[in-house]
Image (cartoon, rainbow, N blue to C red):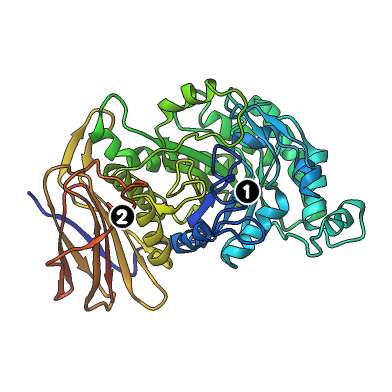
Amino acid sequence: MRTARFTLDPAFTVGEVNPRLFGSFVEHLGRCVYTGVFEPGHPTADADGIRQDVLDLVRELGVTAIRYPGGNFVSGYKWEDSVGPVEDRPRRLDLAWRSTETNRFGLSEYIAFLRKIGPQAEPMMAVNLGTRGVAEALELQEYANHPAGTALSDLRVEHGDKDPFGIRMWCLGNEMDGPWQTGHKTAEEYGRIAAETARAMRQIDPGVELVACGSSGQSMETFAEWEATVLKETYDLVDYISLHAYYEPLDGDVDSFLASAVDMESFIENVVATCDHVGARLKSKKKINLSFDEWNVWYLSRTEAQVSALDWPEAPRLLEDNYSVTDAVVFGSLLIALLRHADRVTVACLAQLVNVIAPIMTEPGGPAWRQTTFFPFSQASRYGRGEVLDVRVDSPTYETRKYGETDLLHATAVRADDGSVTVFAVNRGRTASLPLDVALGGLGVTSVVEHSVLSDADPDARNTLAEPERVTPHAAEGTTLADGRLSAVLEPLSWNVIRLA
């Protein structure tokens, strides 16, 4: 096998990693909230009903901004249902997931959960622009953020939350380009209501950070035209435009699945080009950044049948994909794609946090455990802080049905403030190891601290309730750093973290 190569040099960088790149997502969908994050009566639950075993894993995972309450759920969301005494909160039908929402976990509980995680956990609140509009968004903003002295802020205090919630980031609706969305709109209709909402929210607080809905995927017929139309209305009023993307193997095409990040990087670059084109037309010096606020491996083709069979249950088992080693390698490659575009992708949210296409799984009344995808995320969040170095790989290739000739190596590197460097690398090859040679110019690193690998002889191996630690990272052997060159061998179908100091 030909050696894969690249050069790292501190003079050639992409940009600084925003901690928000390691965000996540909690939606009222399936068991993400109920028996996931929140389960009063569980042996580990605290006085507020938060599972401490889950909380410990969330901290270990290293998530930052957490988007809430949806997702498709938000387009039918009445925020007033989720505040005040729990016994007085109404039960509602959730059209998005054909379930019954009890509202036992609401806005106050969400903020309390974030505070329990720690100061790194930042709220990212979505407002309903599907069945509601400007007035309701302003009321929610006043209830959540105004200190006191108005009807809604005083109501929050009366409900037991004296201190404002301090929500800085707000999503202006969710996937409004999608016909599946309650209150689906054309780009012109959405651009107008997003602009009106943004303008009004800034009257309350000019410092809010606002995310406009971009396309729900690059495959949407309206892709790029949607962004251009929405940004024409909102360019000076918003800070971000959103991207959503999910990947799964289709028709048994595993080789294309392993190259999913090719599509993700193309998606990012095309949205950046569209944003900058609109900015140029408007003669604006402002740059719109990207909020990739839903991304993951998701076996989406199974979902429609699951949801259509429901008869309004509470917290059904939905979207509980059990991830394999192959899924985890693709997942790691998606993380690499986000880091490689850290100059413009400054917010990203892994969808979702617990049980629903999630890195953490739970059993009601029972244990919580890590999925295979837990490990790439936790390692990237821990070691992917600093400045992303520009990586241009010279790699052997393989042929894919969907993306044509594709590099076997997908990689990036991050230099921390202390000068240490972490290389994140995926070998997409399913059967052969991949030799790696990296030239390290002027970085001052002299030793290999660790080479961690996630791989397995069985690419379908996964962690389950019965075997929660079947798959864990292991140490690689033979990785060296000498005379300014890093040499390693990447195992077949593997996610690699190589730390240098």
Quarter containing the C terminus: bottom left
Q: Is residue 331 left or right of residue 49?
A: left
Percent x, y for residue 236?
A: 68, 47
Q: Nearer the viewer, residue 211 or 274?
A: 211
Residue 460 in view: yes
Question: Does residue 273 lie above or below 97 as drawn?
Answer: below
Question: Does residue 27 lie above or below 224 as drawn?
Answer: below
The Cα atoms of the two marked residues, 2 and 1, are separated by: 52 Å
Q: Is residue 171 left or right of residue 387?
A: right
Give the number of the disc on residue 408: none
Percent x, y for residue 476?
A: 18, 63
Residue at 21% x, 47% y: name it. 493
Q: Amino acid at mark 1?
A: Ser
What residue would you read off at disc 2? 469
What residue would you read off at disc 1? 284
Percent x, y for residue 456?
A: 20, 50
- The numbered mark, 2 or 1, whose residue comes first in the sequence reads 1
Q: Residues within 10 Å of mark 2 (few under 14, many from 20)?
A: some
Residue 330's image quarter? Answer: top left
Q: Is residue 17 left or right of residue 498?
A: right
Q: Residues within 10 Å of mark 1 (few under 14, many from 20)?
A: few
Does the CB distance between marks 2 and 1 fall below 8 Å?
no
Q: Nearer the viewer, residue 22 or 242?
A: 22
Q: Amino acid at mark 2?
A: Glu
Element on which disc 1 rests? loop
Residue 347 in view: no
Q: In front: mark 2 or mark 1? A: 2
Residue at 80% x, 40% y: name it. 136
Residue at 87% x, 51% y: name it. 152
Element on which disc 2 rests? loop
